[in-house]
Image: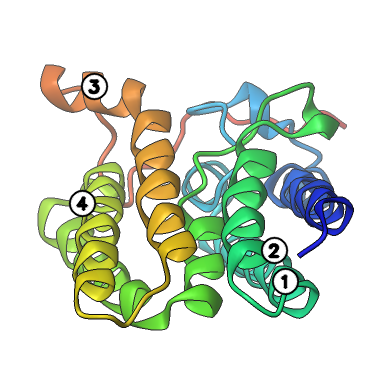
Amino acid sequence: MAVPTLALVVVLAYLIGSIPTGAIVARVYRNVDLTRVGSERTGATNASRALGMGAGVIVLLGDFLKGMLAVWIGQRSDPGTVGMALAGFFVVVGHNRSIFLKGRGGRGVVVGLGGLAVAAVWVFMPACLVGCIVSVLSRYISLGSICGAATAIIGGVVMYVTGNLSFPLLVYAIVTPAYIIIAHADNIARLRAGTERRLGQRVEGVRSNS
């Protein structure tokens, strides 16, 4: 694949990821700046805690579709899998470090899952399942996200060793979940301190900016 085409895929994926779904929904929903409430992240978890489950579901779907769209573009642009791998990583980078939010954003979990669903569905499925189960049983979404990301890494390695995943997608399945886990550094600190918010716990004191 030509380098200019790969560069275009990277730029497009980053810009797609940068679309601040959570920030937009929060503004439309209640004119709230999501980067100033709760965890100050723009993902579905903070949106649901600050604005309610309805808003959280909209953000979740939007972020998931961002990941799918970016990787689909990478897939269409490259007859191999390098384009998908690059798109899958950089759409998460864009989401976490949005150019439209001056480098702020989410943690990349849902966007990463959306990309993984297109690039490697058999890695996506166990990662999603483990993440959901751990989140429900522990009542810590962050812990479920971290465990899901770790499962994706393991799944990627297993799929590659068994000949069911290309090397570029192996790198993608290792680097992207690792990046997502690193993005949870503050959550890990709060989990260790016992101060992490639990599933269903709302953010107090959210006010409309109208």
Q: Position of residue 169 (x, y in %)?
A: 46, 64
Measured Cα–Cα span from mark 1 to mark 2? 5 Å
Where is mark 2, residue-wise?
66
Where is mark 4, residue-wise?
147
Q: Is residue 172 above or below residue 194?
A: below
Is 154 on the left or on the right of 167, as rendered? Answer: left
Measured Cα–Cα span from mark 3 to mark 1? 33 Å
Q: Residue furthest front?
A: 2
Q: Are marks 3 and 4 in contact (CB under 8 Å)?
A: no
Numbered label attached to residue 69: 1
Is 201 on the left or on the right of 126, as rendered? Answer: right
Q: Quadrant of residue 209?
A: top right
Where is mark 3, residue-wise?
190
The residue carrying pointer 3 sits among few (fewer than 14), some (14 to 19) or many (20 or more) residues within 10 Å by Cα, namely some
Quadrant in which the N terminus is drawn: bottom right
Numbered label attached to residue 83: none
Q: Which residue sits at x=33%, y=23%?
A: 185
Under circle 4, the secondary element is helix
Q: Which residue sits at x=43%, y=31%?
A: 183
Q: Are marks 1 and 2 in contact (CB under 8 Å)?
A: yes
Quadrant in which the C terminus is drawn: top right
Please identify, in this view, whether the residue under mark 3 or under mark 1 is nearer the observer: 1
Please identify, in this view, whether the residue under mark 3 or under mark 2 is nearer the observer: 2
